[in-house]
Amino acid sequence: MVAFAMIVVAAISLPLWAQTKVPTKISAQKAQPQLTQTPAAAIAEVKVPNLLWLPRESALEALRRSRLQPDVTDDNKSNSVVIEQPTTPGTNVPVYSKVRYTIGQPVLKLEASTHTTRVNRNVQFTVTLTPSRPVNAERPPIVYEFMWKRGEPASKETNDTFVKQAPQIPGRYDAMVSAIVNDVPLESNRVEVKVEPKISVTPTPPTPTPTPTPEPHPKLLGVILLVAAILGTLAAAYGFQKLKKSRVAASARVKISTGNRRIKARILEPQSLKSRCLTRVRWVRGPLFSKMTTQNHIVKKKGAAHG
């Protein structure tokens, strides 16, 4: 009887014990992943540091501190720095990942706004640094030394864009700049600039303004025309009278011939004496032997005086 009671108690308590154990095992399995995932996620990734402009030793030290490995292309030259980093600084990457970068010489490039100018004219220059130096308030600005030709005195500039006055002597110049960036001496390319002489401009004399001719007054113009008409009439009358007298004088022609011992004079062509003018013929020297015969057809109305 006692044995039967013990068997019954055991049969009842076994299912109850199983029910109480199973939920505890399941809750433990659910809680276990949360405890293991949180620490693993905290150390899985790190940020990539900025390696630009760092020397090769400094770049290796920055990667070691960040628990990253280098994948470097090096030119093996002195004073070289990191000039290229494909992975953007600050990007999250897995721990002990390889970071690719390049070590070489930075490039200083000079550009001019024009390659032909004249004496004493301004030329604008622009300097480009590759790679660009990271902005840091603690670092002093870059000082560029500009010169028109190697060997000539240099001038200092602190801006990437500046203006320079062309030399006073015409010719060809190779402009360039130099600088020291992060203890690395740099020298730019040469930019050829042709400086031409000034153009001498001859001042053009001002064009004189023509003086307007005043128009004559209508009354004055009438008086001038009247005077001109009177003078024209008088000139025509005088010319006609003079022409008439010259014709009359030309109609009387007298010829005198001389000999060895005696002088004979006679009137030739007496018919030419037919005129209204009185013709006088006078002998004033020498013995007088003259014969003046009047022809029958000469009109004796006015006559002729002989002496």
Image (cartoon, grey):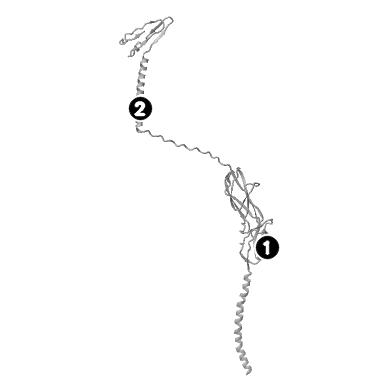
Q: Secondary structure at mark 1?
A: helix
Left or right: where does residue 235 sit relative to residue 81? left
Front-lying residue, 138 or 146 = 138
In the rendered image, the quadrant that contains the C terminus is top left
**Of callouts 1 and 2, the N-terminal one:** 1
Residue named by callout 1: 61
Q: Residues within 10 Å of mark 2 (few under 14, many from 20)?
A: few
- Whether residue 234 is visible: yes
Q: Residues within 10 Å of mark 1 (few under 14, many from 20)?
A: few
Residue named by callout 2: 227
Q: In the rendering, at what x and y percent does residue 45 appear?
A: 63, 67
Left or right: where does residue 87 sit relative to residue 244? right
Q: Secondary structure at mark 2?
A: helix
Q: In the rendering, at what x and y percent does residue 247 appear?
A: 36, 17
Q: Amino acid at mark 2?
A: Val
For this orientation, the residue located farthest to the top is 261
In the rendered image, the quadrant that contains the N terminus is bottom right
- What's the residue at 62%, 70% (across, down)? 42
- What's the residue at 36%, 21% (across, down)? 238
Say above or below: 104 vs 10: above
Say above or below: 62 vs 198: below
Q: Amino acid at mark 1?
A: Glu
Say above or below: 145 vs 294: below
Say above or below: 103 vs 288: below
- Verify CB contact (< 8 Å) between mark 1 and mark 2: no
- What's the residue at 61%, 90% (across, down)? 9
Residue 208: image tag: none
